[in-house]
Amino acid sequence: MPDTSPSPPVPALPVPRRAIFGWILFDPACQPYFTLITTFIFAPYFASAVAATPVEGQALWGFATGAAGLVIAVCSPVLGAVADAAGRRKPWIFAFGLMMMAGAAALWFAEPGNTARIPLVLAAFAIGTIGVEFATVFNNAIMPALVPKERLGRLSGAGWAAGYFGGLVALALMLGFFATQPDTGLTLLGRPPAFGLDAAAREGDRFSGPLTALWYAVLVIPMFLFVPDAPRAMPMGEAIRTGLGEIRRLIPRLKERPVLARFLLANMVYTDALVALFAFGGIYAAGTFGWGSIEIGIFGILLTLTGTAGALAGGWIDDALGPRTVILGALLVLLIACVGLLSLDRGAVLFGLVPTAPGSGLFGSVPEKIYLGLGLLIGAVAGPLQAASRTLLVRLAPAENMAECFGLFALSGKITSFAAPTCVALVTAATGSQKAGVAVLVAFFVLGAVLVRGRTGAHDADATQD
């Protein structure tokens, strides 16, 4: 049946360019938290240098991530419903941004080998993760009031592209001036860490936390100065009561909106697989090709470049063909890339059918070059996939419950955030094969595509039907 819920609001007056610019800058303000702390710099440093063993470090990091994810899963829809009732979004962004900054800055105290600091470090990481995720929920909820519906894809894609670029610049700064090789004490540029930081105490790597906090504090200023906020709708106490009442009515509303419910389920499945693919990509490369921090760092920079270009292109395709088309296309590319990655060995391609000669130098062998190319392809579609998912939610969600639905969107991306990684780990342990473990992700991407595709109707821009 046709979906007759109201469309997302369009501002009565044109929004100034500086407001659009301020909103877009929020993504690059937050991105170093994910690029520097959770992926390329701090997390590997913690597992290899702070914890007693890398295995213990990985487990502890996983428990902290799981605890943060549980809080996010429980609280996201509640906070979103309260914000919808209260009207204003910026106070929430301010409070949760402070949480992220405090958690990130506290990571400085993660001294190498100081296991007594581990509880503090893990608590700081969990607090920072909760802060950055919740701040993003409320920033996303501002998006429909900034541009007309037909330009949402370009706005979302521009935000993701700017975020990738911000992560790229932050990662390049860290590798060039701060993060050091443990054996040499030098950065990627062959220099000691900047500002007199002590390489022996790994202060360059630890600086990723304070740098992330400072980066956010500077780049988020235009959002607070220039982006219009919704007017206050009701006092906070009444907003909390109203919001909790909205949550109690949530399940019946989702039953009345099966397209929205199915999309949230699909987002849960394929986002879980995408997170796991990025989480295990470096581990898989290290185990298959023996890549170290320099190779993985350069790989991360190149992947971010393709992600930036992909997010920009995906926004235009989104507006032209609809976000569902972008999502399905991205999932198809991810499936092909996953199979391609699994077909590579250190000395062969195509599942061992074609032997290759050993290579020398950076990414010297043919399998390494193919792995690099497939990784860059994954990066190119990851941005459009996430940006189009955000746009599709705006198209499907009722305007009066936008923040609540973005809370559900965050929930659907976090509630099973360990399902895919756990399946990968279990299969790897049972089979003794990295390939068998990573192959699990193929099933997740297939299921996500089936759930997204399971609808009638020709085009997202025209209608959403079930």
Image: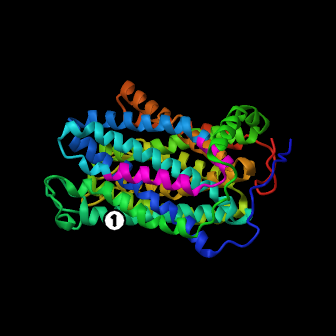
Q: Amino acid at mark 1?
A: Ala
SS assignment at label 1: helix
Identify the image quadrant of residue 300. bottom left
Q: Position of residue 301 (x, y in %)?
A: 38, 62
Residue occupying image coordinates x 42% and y 61%: 216
Q: Can I make out residue 179 in this image? A: yes
Residue occupying image coordinates x 37% and y 63%: 170
Residue interval drawn in magenta = 79-105
Residue 157 belongs to magenta span: no
Identify the image quadrant of residue 187. bottom left
Question: Is 251 left or right of 217, judged from the image as shown?
Answer: right
Near-viewer residue (406 or 273):
406
Near-viewer residue (342 or 50):
50
Mark 1 sits on what residue? 172
In the rendered image, which quarter contains the C terminus? top right
- Local crowd size for mark 1, using a 10 Å CA cut-off: few (<14), some (14–19), many (≥20): some
Q: Position of residue 226 (x, y in %)?
A: 57, 70
Question: Is 133 left or right of 127, judged from the image as shown?
Answer: right
Total labels drawn: 1
Residue 104 belongs to magenta span: yes
Name the chief secondary structure element in magenta.
Answer: helix
Q: Is residue 398 above or below residue 191?
A: above
Q: Is residue 184 above or below residue 262?
A: below
Near-viewer residue (399 or 386):
399
Question: Is 141 left or right of 284, judged from the image as shown?
Answer: right
Q: Position of residue 385 (x, y in %)?
A: 58, 53
Q: Is residue 221 above or below residue 266?
A: below
Residue occupying image coordinates x 33% and y 40%: 122
